[in-house]
Image (cartoon, helix red, strand yellow):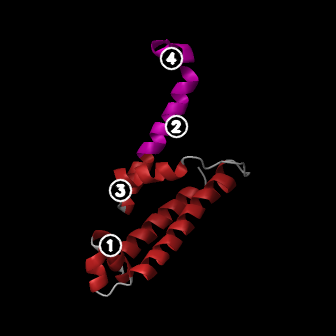
């Protein structure tokens, strides 16, 4: 465990505050639920889209720093393969709520680590014998 856990929990708290306590969060949720109605309500969709993409890129950069500075301690080609799709699955299971994504991430992390542990303990011949031609 490293400082990335604290950074992740701080980003969850910040995003929860931003989404549910600010005007920006209200406009963002309105844009996500009904973009045309939000535009008629005075939300500038293009500006909001660019701001949300910038915030998402910043959070994705935090994920990359965890891999480089806290997990592997070096950069290698393709080190984040599949992380984006895993993040989408975590967001869907967490129902796109900051607190829900914490529990979904713990679930997916447990499943991923458990799969690695099982793969190390069970021989390949046992699991792949049913699928041989």
Q: Secondary structure at mark 1?
A: helix
- The CA span between labels 2 and 4 is 20 Å
Q: Which residue is mark 1?
A: 29
- The CA span between labels 4 and 1 is 46 Å
Q: Secondary structure at mark 3?
A: helix
- The CA span between labels 1 and 2 is 34 Å
The residue lying toward the viewer, choosing from 133 and 55, is 133
How crowded is the residue under tag 1: few (<14 C-alpha within 10 Å), some, or many (20+)?
A: some
Which of the two labelled residues, at mark 4 and mark 3, occupies the earlier sequence position? 3
The residue lying toward the viewer, choosing from 1 and 49, is 49
Q: Residue at x 27, y 72 (%)?
A: 34
* Residue 123 visible in rendering: no
Q: Which residues are magenta?
A: 107-133
Q: Is residue 114 left or right of residue 65?
A: left
Vertical comparison of 113 with 29: above or below: above
- The CA span between labels 4 and 3 is 35 Å
Magenta region includes residue 126: yes
CB under 8 Å between discs 1 and 2: no
Vertical comparison of 70 with 47: above or below: above
Which of the two labelled residues, at mark 3 and mark 1, occupies the earlier sequence position? 1
Q: Is residue 77 left or right of residue 50?
A: right
* Residue 92 visible in rendering: yes
Which of the 4 image quadrants contains residue 41?
A: bottom left
- The CA span between labels 3 and 1 is 16 Å
Which of the 4 image quadrants contains residue 21?
A: bottom left
Q: Which residue is mark 4?
A: 128
How crowded is the residue under tag 3: few (<14 C-alpha within 10 Å), some, or many (20+)?
A: some
CB under 8 Å between discs 4 and 1: no
Q: Say the numbered circle drawn on residue 113.
A: 2
Which of the two labelled residues, at mark 2 and mark 3, occupies the earlier sequence position? 3
Q: Say the numbered circle drawn on residue 100.
A: 3
């Amino acid at each position: 465990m490293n400082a990335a856990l604290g950074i992740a929990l701080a980003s969850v708290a910040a995003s929860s505050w931003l989404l549910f306590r600010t005007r920006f969060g209200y406009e963002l949720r309105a844009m996500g639920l009904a973009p045309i109605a939000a535009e008629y309500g005075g939300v500038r969709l293009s500006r909001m889209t660019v701001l949300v993409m910038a915030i998402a890129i910043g959070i994705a950069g935090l994920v990359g720093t965890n891999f480089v500075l806290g997990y592997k301690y070096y950069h290698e080609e393709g080190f984040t393969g599949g992380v984006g799709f895993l993040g989408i699955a975590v967001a869907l299971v967490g129902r796109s709520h900051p607190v829900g994504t914490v529990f979904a991430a713990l679930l997916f992390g447990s499943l991923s680590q458990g799969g690695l542990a099982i793969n190390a303990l069970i021989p390949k011949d046992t699991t792949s014998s049913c699928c041989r031609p």
